[in-house]
Image (cartoon, grey):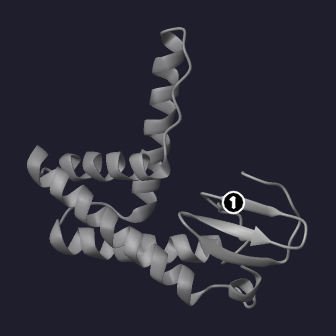
Amino acid sequence: VKEVCTSNRATTEGEGIVLHDNVGMITFDVLSFDLDGTLWPTEEVVFAANEKMTTFLNGNYPGTPAANHIQTVMKSIRKRRREEAEAGGGVAPPVSYTELRHAALHQVTEEAGYTEREAEKASTDAFHVWLGERNDAAGRLLFSGVEDML
């Protein structure tokens, strides 16, 4: 933040978002919202992305599991990381959902009998399918008035 103000008008300037009023200016490099249903119905968006990812994965890599199993694997990876760090007297570093999803996709594809190389390609491709649908679904399901508010 370069300068502090209150505002109701935003423009883009350089790499960030700049809010203006008669008092001053705030520059943001990132404006982030939690996945809490602020902009779109989070559960519906993630469900749509999971469904498309599963369809892709199962269609291209027969024997791979459904999205609910991949979610379970994501939770187990997070738990294992935390337990390993605590056993070593430390704290597990933060891990993103992207990292967890990719690791889980890789693991379940290998468990389905695919090679390391195939699992890497499958997990990367399936994640991109998931991300694309997550973005598309978020756009389709954006709550009324959100664009005007932003």
Establish if 68 lies above or below 94. Answer: below
Q: Is residue 54 left or right of residue 88?
A: left
Q: Quadrant of residue 66?
A: bottom left
Residue 136, x across and y down, in percent:
46, 83
Q: Is residue 77 left or right of residue 119?
A: right
**How far across and how far down the image is residue 97, in percent?**
48, 51
Q: Quadrant of residue 130?
A: bottom left
In the image, what residue occupies the spot 54% across and 14% down? 90
Residue carrying label 1 = 27
Amino acid type indicated by mark 1: Thr
Residue at x 68%, y 62% (from the top left corner): 33
Name the quadrant of the C terminus: bottom right
Q: Are there few (<14), some (14-19), or many (20+) residues within 10 Å of tag 1?
A: many
Note whether 96 is above or below 134 in the view shown.
Answer: above
Residue shown at 20%/75% (left/top)? 59
Q: Is residue 18 visible?
A: yes
- Along the line of sight, which residue is nearer the eye, 142 or 147? 147
Residue 115 in sight in this render: no
Residue 72 vs residue 130, the one in the foreground? 130
Q: Quadrant of residue 18?
A: bottom right
Provide the secondary structure element on which disc 1 rests: strand
Q: Percent from the top left, x then y, of residue 10?
A: 73, 76
Q: How many marks?
A: 1
Out of 111 and 135, give the one closest to the viewer: 135
Residue reaching furthest to the top:
89
Residue at 84% x, 63% y: name it: 24
Q: Position of residue 71 (x, y in %)?
A: 46, 54
